[in-house]
Amino acid sequence: MSNIIIVTGAAGFIGFHLCKKLLENGTNVIGIDNINDYYDINLKEKRLDILNKFPLKNNMWEFFKIDLENKNALLKVFEKYNPKTVVNLAAQAGVRYSLKNPSAYIYSNIVGFSNILEACKINEVKNLLYASSSSVYGGNTKVPFSESDSVNHPVSLYAATKLSNELMAHSYSHLFGLSCTGLRFFTVYGPWGRPDMAPMIFTKAILSNQPIKIFNNGDMSRSFTYIDDIIEMTYKLINKPATPDYKFNRNNPNPSTSWNNHRIFNLGNENSIKLLDFIQLLEDELQIESFKQFENMQPGDVQNTASNCSSLNEWIGFTDYTPLKKGVKYFIKWYKDFYK
């Protein structure tokens, strides 16, 4: 069977939505996830349940519960289905958790990703897309962040592992001709979101009359990006694999392109918003005022993120961002329906 795409992290927030989009468009999808307990397994299983019951259009959906560190199990799936496109969204996520459990990030994000690269090499995959993160910009203060900026000063182990993924992918592109596209996601929110991220944490606190912890005394901003926009960008990138930059100058190298089939793109809303303004949008939609508890900056956090997507827009022509007010409305409706 042709036209098979493997999506790792299929039970995760972005992975679930991407699988759903691919199935809606008649693609044959193989999902892989280890369903770990980093956050509520019930949420992951509900997402999977939707995919398992999805009305297919003569296409295929199969799911495998596999750890990326399990190279043999991974290779068996690749060998059986012979995918030509792979989207690696599986990772140990979260900045603050990396301070508590660093080994989880090494195993999943470094060892696991190296197994993905090997599986792609052995099975002659034509197109690999992999999740990076806006966290790689680390201590940079020039905003908006551009892919041509240096990212040599990460401020968390999570960010360091994501930067490592970009370097590993480039080496495989150079050595084995693997076409690789790195996706630097900026704060993604929306229905079926991750409970460890700010929109879910804040909403839960507001509805239960608990104080919201606001770090750096509220002096923070983020490029909150609605999930549907992220999926549309990723879907377009699946259909436009990385190609060499024939103008690449080795005397003045652009970190986001290469003489090889390797590209890196920011995937984020170009309209960054102050954290307190985002909380105000949640309050307006919930019609409840929050209790705010201002605290100092947390280790590993970045003060401001803002996405420059000019390279992405030039590559795939994406400019249609969901307005934040509308995105928050959709998110709150889902949250109330799901958590009753």
Image (tube, helix red, strand yellow):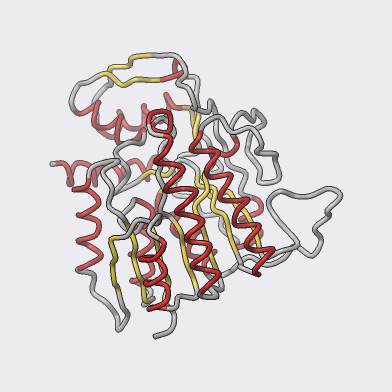
**Residue 45 percent coordinates (x, y):** 21, 54
Residue in view at x 33 percent, y 52 percent: 12
Query: Looking at the image, how many numbered discs can be counted on the residues?
Result: 0
User: Residue 237 lies in what quarter of the image?
Assistant: bottom right
User: Residue 160 lies in what quarter of the image?
Assistant: top right
Of the pair 176 and 274, the residue shown nearer to us: 176
Left-right relation of 279 to 314: left
Q: Where 328 sits versus 254, above or below?
A: above
**Residue 326 percent coordinates (x, y):** 37, 45
Q: Where 263 sits versus 266, above or below?
A: below
Left-right relation of 333 to 95: left
**Residue 98 percent coordinates (x, y):** 42, 33
Residue in view at x 30 percent, y 48 percent: 191
Left-right relation of 104 to 172: left
Residue in view at x 48 percent, y 59 percent: 115
Residue at the right extreme, as displayed:
251
Q: Where 266 sits versus 8, above or below?
A: above
Residue at the front extreme, as displayed:
72
Of the pair 153 and 268, the residue shown nearer to us: 153
- Quarter of the image that includes the N terminus: bottom left
Residue at the left extreme, as displayed:
340
**Residue 244 percent coordinates (x, y):** 72, 65
User: Residue 231 lies in what quarter of the image?
Assistant: bottom left
Residue in view at x 42 percent, y 19 percent: 215
- Quarter of the image that includes the C terminus: top left
